[in-house]
């Protein structure tokens, strides 16, 4: 088991390194265009551009540029030239909102997804099943930002059921915090609930025709026990792994789209605004850190996965 | 695995008594199954309809709306039901749907005809989606087949590369590339692509999804490679290229066919997301994503700006998704006797 | 139908009071290709302490027969007719609840592939305990102790450690032994073994069959052994029923079947065995043609399209009757017995031969 963990962590470290290089290349080394100009943004003066070229070392050899860039990012020295603010500070300010959104939505869609998946597997072919299939299809076909906008319009604007966006810190007022988060949570989850329930349902139906389930039935144990102890337990395993990937994907992108619609002032929204203005430094930092987070999370999940499924530990 | 299903399947080959093997190939069988799936066909038709409509954008613009997608009519007026109205009111409120030739679906805050932009934008979105899908499928198949077939060092390099791109969250990678390329475009050798060309988002989206398709293909090729017909071909003197082309590729065709609609859907959605953020299709080119982005700011007063492109987008993606699902069900080699059987079995067993 | 009368009268006379008496069992499935009659009028009985082997190719209906006895084929698309009398009840018409109580406790089943037959994420001991506690009111510890005893009884070394093993940590032979141990855990009166050795290699096969033999001696349970392998049949069976296209085409004691087979299909099966004690054939004889579609079976005798000895009368389905002399030896072939004994001699041994 320890060997597995060590190996996984090593490969994680390698991937992190590779990502940092890739990000660096994308932003600093694209053939065509001047990286300093790119970094300075749309409205910039020649002096700024020259200053950037100096501090970031764009005249240095590529590998040195890479080191300079990495150092700047990880010591929080990156400054947005268009906004004149320190990127890391801004990120820190937005983190609570982003985490609230991601974690809350993640828990919601996992619980609901499993519940609905179980329901639709058991009552296969019934109304719940068809309804969920429709929900899954629509969920997978609708961009989350569109859904958010529509939800805001109908539920917050037309009918003042929910606040019209905005974020209230948890520490300030928990009830208000939840009140503001409900709609974003729901919107973000709707997408995934459909998919998850369908995946669980399909896994369960597959598992139900597996040999060991037939053996379990032949043993004479109750149908409910067969369903929960044998079918569900085995079908959940891939769900957990899927969940962690999607959770990472939310952090790595879904959040960006949702936050801007609901004006949650999180890291995602910061990224969205920076992109709109083609302000490179924040985008670069956020992309890098986001990717890092995803990779680390994926490694952690793999380890947890190995704990859940005894078959994996031997590999 | 001697389940009831396989036992029953073994007992019921098609045809009378003796001549069983007058085979129906998997494609004919799949097509038959697909034809029975009315829902999938209906949604496929919906998607096709949208595609055709968007391709007719110039026709619509010239003959029905009499304007172009980027033409501002801020100061114009239009007659609706006998009443003269401002296209964009003095307070900046654009007109809603007029349900007639001009401004059929209303105007945006720049006085541009929404319906015309919808169709042109759709054309852009679909074009980006199509090109991206093409890039993905071609490169992914190439990568997957080469990696799976040659294994060893070649596979090592390709697989690592795929893992890297895949480790990068799709949206983030898209944003990174989009932002970076939007400013300066890209020069690959002699090929120079401007920052605001449609090819940039198409290229980005195409690249980003390569691992998604390449990894399963690689896995399948690894398996196919071990099968006897490959050995037989090799013994018959076929070179690696020949084997890949005539033995491996045909066996991949159903996987590829299943992936195409899925990729089109993903590409359209990613394009919408990137364009919404500003890292995709660049203004003034319209796309459904940019239209939604423009419209969101004005939601309280001019909901149609978001609603119209939004509905169109969802319908298009839904269409291709449901159709793709149907294709997958039709070609699924693991076809159970009937999905309803297993469902009912579960129900009865309760 | 005359078949039913004959075999059920047999049931009453043959075994004093048979453990299981199946009468005219029919199982049909509705599929996208039409109605498939997987089992079409099957009747047999099993006495306590005896091993009945049901032999046939895939698609003959033998597995469906076995699984139907425990209600494992029940579904919305399945149709059942006939009776299966066991312990005073009819299994075919029993409620799901009744069946659940019978499963694992009075009738146990062992399946073909032990790798997929055991829950991969549950420890082996726990799986046995689960079965015990589903039928008997014992504590977990008591059940675990019984499980340990069972593992020992089926010849698994170091049973205490093995209880905590996962299925993938055991070899194929050991997994199958676990399945047998599990099946025996509540001391069933009837054991149905569906191709128990097919997924194992030959040496392990012998060991597993030895287990089955031992079990039969020790507990006087009845065993239905479903297989396509005549070698396995010769090793452990007392009586044999040969199935083809959903029907029994020959039924009798082991000796009757191997030394005086009455049905051409049986000849074909016997003729295609590679025998060590005979000169090596230049080519292993196989039965020409393929099994018929059960959605649309041939008219008359179902083996007719593949039978080199078919003649005019074969367009009429032969009833399952005793024609060879012994009351218990039934077959479905119109050929006169004397002709059969002649036609089945091919190249010095029993075989199907080719059309005259």
Image: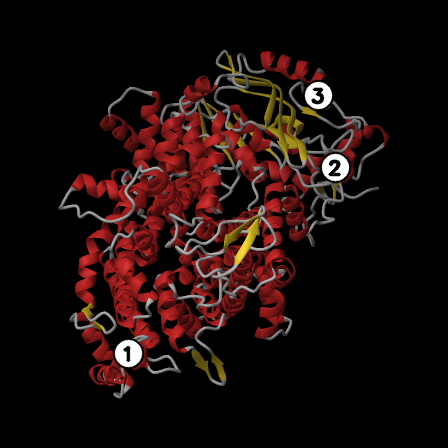
Q: Quadrant of residue A14?
A: bottom left
Q: Which residue is mark 3?
A: C322
* Residue A115 image point, x, y percent: 36, 35
Secondary-structure class at tag 3: loop
Q: Real-space Cα distance between discs 1 and 2?
A: 100 Å
Q: Which mark is residue A44?
A: 1
* Residue C294 image point, x, y percent: 68, 34
Q: Which mark is residue C249?
A: none
Q: Residue at x 78, y 38 (%)?
A: C305
Q: Real-space Cα distance between discs 1 and 3?
A: 103 Å
Q: Residue at x 58, y 62 (%)?
A: B228
Task: Give the farthest residue toward the left.
Answer: A171
Q: Which residue is mark 2?
A: C344
Chain assignment, label 3? C
* Residue B325 image point, x, y percent: 54, 48
Tell which circle, 2 or 3, labels the residue nearer the N-terminal end.
3
């Amino acid at each position: 088991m320890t060997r597995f963990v060590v190996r996984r962590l090593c490969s994680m470290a390698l991937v992190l390194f590779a990502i940092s290089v890739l990000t660096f290349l994308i932003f600093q080394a694209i053939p065509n265009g001047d990286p300093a100009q790119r970094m300075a943004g749309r409205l910039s003066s020649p002096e700024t551009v020259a200053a950037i070229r100096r501090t970031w070392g764009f005249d240095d050899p590529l590998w040195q540029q890479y080191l300079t860039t990495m150092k700047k990012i990880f010591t929080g020295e990156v400054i947005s030239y268009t906004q004149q603010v320190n990127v890391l500070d801004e990120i820190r300010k937005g983190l609570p909102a982003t985490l609230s959104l991601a974690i809350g939505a993640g828990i919601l869609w996992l619980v609901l997804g499993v519940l609905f998946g179980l329901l639709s597997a058991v009552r296969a072919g019934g109304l719940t099943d068809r309804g969920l299939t429709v929900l899954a299809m629509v969920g997978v076909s609708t961009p989350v930002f569109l859904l958010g906008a529509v939800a805001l319009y109908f539920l917050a604007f037309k009918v003042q059921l929910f606040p019209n966006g905005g974020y209230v810190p948890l520490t300030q007022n928990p009830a208000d915090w939840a009140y503001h988060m409900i709609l974003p949570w729901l919107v973000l989850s709707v997408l995934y609930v459909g998919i998850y329930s369908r995946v669980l349902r399909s896994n369960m139906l597959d598992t139900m025709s597996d040999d060991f389930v037939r053996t379990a039935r032949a043993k004479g144990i109750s149908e409910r026990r067969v369903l929960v102890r044998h079918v569900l337990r085995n079908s959940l395993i891939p769900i957990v792994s899927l969940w962690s990937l999607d959770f990472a994907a939310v952090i790595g992108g879904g959040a960006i789209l949702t936050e801007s619609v609901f004006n949650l002032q999180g890291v995602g929204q910061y990224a969205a605004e920076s992109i709109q203005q083609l302000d490179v430094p924040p985008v670069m930092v956020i992309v890098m850190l986001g990717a890092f987070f995803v990779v680390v999370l994926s490694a952690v999940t793999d380890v947890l996965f190995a704990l859940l499924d005894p078959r994996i530990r031997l590999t | 695995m001697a389940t009831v299903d396989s036992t029953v399947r073994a007992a019921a080959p098609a045809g009378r008594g003796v001549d069983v093997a007058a085979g129906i190939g998997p494609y004919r069988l799949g097509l038959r199954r697909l034809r029975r799936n009315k829902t999938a066909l209906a949604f496929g038709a919906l998607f096709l309809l949208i595609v055709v409509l968007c391709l007719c954008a110039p026709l619509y613009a010239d003959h029905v709306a009499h304007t172009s997608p980027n033409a501002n009519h801020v100061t114009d007026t239009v007659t609706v039901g006998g009443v003269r109205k401002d296209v964009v009111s003095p307070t900046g409120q654009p007109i809603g749907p007029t349900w007639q030739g001009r401004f059929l679906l209303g105007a945006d805050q720049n006085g541009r005809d929404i319906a015309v932009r919808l169709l042109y934008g759709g054309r852009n979105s679909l074009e980006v989606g199509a090109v991206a899908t093409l890039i993905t499928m071609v490169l992914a198949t190439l990568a997957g087949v080469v990696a799976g077939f040659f294994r060893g060092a070649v596979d090592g390099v390709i697989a690592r590369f795929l893992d890297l791109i895949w480790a990068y969250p799709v949206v983030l990678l898209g944003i990174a590339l989009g932002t970076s390329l939007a400013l300066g475009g890209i020069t690959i050798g002699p090929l120079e692509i401007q920052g605001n060309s449609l090819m940039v988002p198409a290229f980005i989206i195409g690249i980003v999804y390569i691992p998604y398709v390449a990894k399963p293909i690689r896995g399948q090729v690894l398996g196919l490679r071990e099968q006897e017909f490959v050995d037989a071909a090799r013994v018959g003197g076929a070179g690696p290229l020949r084997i890949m082309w005539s033995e491996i590729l045909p066996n991949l065709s159903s996987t590829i066919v299943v992936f195409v609609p899925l990729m089109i859907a993903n590409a359209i959605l990613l394009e919408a997301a990137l364009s919404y953020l500003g890292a995709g299709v660049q203004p003034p080119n319209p796309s459904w994503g940019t239209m939604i982005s423009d419209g969101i700011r004005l939601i309280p007063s001019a909901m149609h700006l978001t609603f119209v492109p939004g509905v169109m987008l969802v319908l298009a993606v839904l269409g291709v998704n449901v159709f793709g699902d149907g294709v997958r069900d039709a070609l699924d080699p693991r076809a159970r006797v009937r999905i309803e059987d297993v469902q009912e079995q579960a129900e009865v067993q309760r | 139908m005359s078949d039913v009368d004959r075999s059920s009268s047999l049931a009453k006379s043959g075994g004093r009071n048979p453990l299981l008496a199946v009468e005219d069992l029919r199982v049909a499935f509705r599929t996208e290709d039409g109605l498939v009659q997987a089992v079409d009028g099957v009747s047999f009985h099993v006495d306590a302490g005896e091993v009945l082997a049901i032999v046939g190719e895939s698609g003959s209906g033998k597995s469906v027969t076995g699984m139907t006895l425990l209600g494992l084929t029940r579904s919305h698309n399945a149709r059942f007719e006939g009776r299966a009398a066991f312990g005073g009840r009819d299994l075919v018409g029993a409620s799901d609840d009744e069946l659940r109580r019978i499963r694992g406790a009075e009738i146990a089943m062992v399946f073909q592939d032990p790798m997929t037959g055991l829950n991969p994420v549950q420890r082996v001991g726990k799986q046995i305990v689960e079965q015990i506690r589903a039928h008997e009111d014992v504590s977990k510890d008591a059940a675990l102790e019984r499980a340990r005893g069972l593992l020992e009884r089926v010849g698994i070394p170091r049973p205490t450690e093995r209880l905590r093993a996962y299925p993938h940590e055991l070899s194929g032979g050991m997994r199958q032994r676990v399945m047998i141990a599990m099946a025996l855990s509540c001391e069933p009166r009837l054991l149905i073994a569906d191709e128990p050795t097919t997924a194992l290699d030959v040496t392990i096969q012998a060991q597993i069959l030895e287990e089955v033999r031992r079990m039969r001696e020790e507990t006087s349970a009845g065993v239905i052994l479903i297989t396509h392998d005549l070698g396995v049949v010769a090793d452990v069976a007392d009586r044999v029923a040969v199935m083809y296209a959903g029907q029994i085409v020959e039924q009798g004691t082991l000796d009757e079947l191997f030394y005086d087979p009455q049905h051409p299909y049986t000849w074909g099966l016997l003729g295609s065995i590679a025998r060590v004690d005979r000169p090596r054939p230049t080519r292993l004889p196989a039965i020409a043609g393929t099994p018929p579609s059960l959605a649309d079976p041939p008219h008359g005798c179902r083996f007719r399209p593949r039978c080199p000895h078919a003649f005019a009368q074969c367009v009429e389905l032969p009833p399952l009757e005793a024609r060879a002399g012994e009351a218990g030896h039934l077959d479905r072939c119109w050929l006169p017995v004397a002709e059969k004994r002649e036609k089945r001699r091919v190249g010095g041994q029993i075989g199907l031969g080719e059309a005259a």
